[in-house]
Image (cartoon, rainbow, N blue to C red):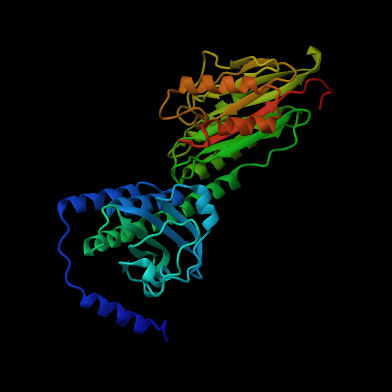
Amino acid sequence: MAHDPWQRRDRARHRVASRPPRRALDRQQLRHLLDGIAAVSANLDTRGMLHHIVEAATDLVAARYGALGVLDESGKVIDLITVGIDDPHLCAVMGLPQGHGLLHTMVDDREPLRVADVPTHPRSAGFPPGHPVMRTLLGVPLMVRGTVYGDLYVADKRDGTPFDDDDEGLLTALASAAGVSLENARLYEHLKHAAEHFQRRMLPVLPDLTPLEVAARYEPASELPRLGGDWYDAMVLPDGATWVVVGDVTGHDVEAAPLMGQIRNMLRAIALDRAEPPGMIVSRLDRVLTMFDEPPTATLVLGRIERDPADGGRYTFGWSNAGHLPPLLVGADGSTRYLAPARHGIPVGIEASVPRFSHNHPLAPGSTLLLFTDGLVERRDQDIDTGLDGLAEQAAHLATAPLEELCDALISRNRQVFDDDVALLALRTPLAGPAR
């Protein structure tokens, strides 16, 4: 009956009733508490948040050591975050606590634990070899949605005094706020994964474009769990030409992704209907979109790659740009050029009568064509021209690298931290070989 919930409740009530009333926290303590809560709440990454919780706890009560043991559903410690033990080798050798000693009291009772002399406590299991000897300890259970997420504890105040009621109150308040923040982080990560999964499901499986090589990447924005409107697409037209597009629907909400799907499907239908230059296809899309009561808008580059037998089988890229960043052409020799003619165009869906232009550029054997959305080159700490220059420089160094390797390198150039969604489509002409 030691774990009977009613007996546990009665014991907890008795402990609370037998304690003398705590005095109110002074302004400095409140300020430190609020600073700690703010530091914890500022991070929505669970792992980073756990480190902030332990750091805030040790700072709050001026402790030498701090730790947070994360528990699984059975109460087993599955992760341990520490502060004050700086030797990573020592942490690895010590391993995870087994959860059978003093610290598990917090999990059993769901109450704060304050110990004046750890080595002599009847439930102390001792310390593993190399572990600093700790004399005083203060711990609280970390609760998330009514279950024990972990045990948060600090040891040995820097001034050598024992932990008191104020310390316990501060740590309890921090743990309570941290529990709410952890639940928010869980919801955030769930929403982010769901949004990313939905977004990826809406992107096409690329067809076989042999003898052209093709690769694509999509990466969601790093910070917000949102549905974006970035997309790429490619297909082989009835006349044998290859049709490609990269675009970005305006907005980042639950409407952006469905609108992206609608525009993508409209473009496919229009392009398959008849063989037309890219500018004429974009014009037809404009006319369709402006029939909506609230026309969606998007930037895009629509391209057509075809081989001209009369020109020795060389490839030509024809394209129309509707307010989008220009494609980047990378030669096999490492030369780079942004295909940015003077007549750039405005986003689709704004004005049906706006003229759309088609442009053409030869594609030398072994050249690589990169179409991308602005998330690949935009960062808060630099202007977009710097991002475009950096992309061209890196692509030049990888001009002959396998296309999949090139895409991976370009996506990871920002260390996979993106302020906006990223869609990237890469195509490469063969060095030599027969036509399709």
- Residue 88 relative to residue 274: left or right: left
Give the quadrant of residue 126.
bottom left
Q: Is 368 placed above or below 174 here?
A: above
Q: Is 65 placed above or below 277 here?
A: below
Using the image as rendered, state which of residue 354 and residue 411 is in the foreground. Answer: 411
In the picture as drawn, the residue positioned furthest to the right comes out as 434
Number of disc labels: 0
Q: Residue 359 at x, y = what percent? A: 61, 16
Using the image as rendered, state which of residue 96 and residue 234 is in the foreground. Answer: 96
Is residue 423 visible in the rendered image? The answer is: yes
The residue at the point 54 percent across, 53 percent down is 92
Q: Residue 31 at x, y = what percent? A: 21, 49
Q: Residue 103 at x, y = what percent? A: 41, 67
Using the image as rendered, state which of residue 414 and residue 86 is in the foreground. Answer: 86
Is residue 266 visible in the rendered image? The answer is: no
The residue at the point 35 percent across, 59 percent down is 155
Give the quadrant of residue 379.
top left
Can you say which quadrant of the picture contains the N terminus? bottom left
- Residue 186 relative to residue 341: left or right: left
Give the quadrant of residue 381.
top left
The residue at the point 56 percent across, 49 percent down is 197
In the picture as drawn, the residue positioned furthest to the bottom comes out as 1
- Residue 20 relative to residue 238: left or right: left
Q: Residue 403 at x, y = what percent? A: 69, 30
Can you say which quadrant of the picture contains the C terminus? top right
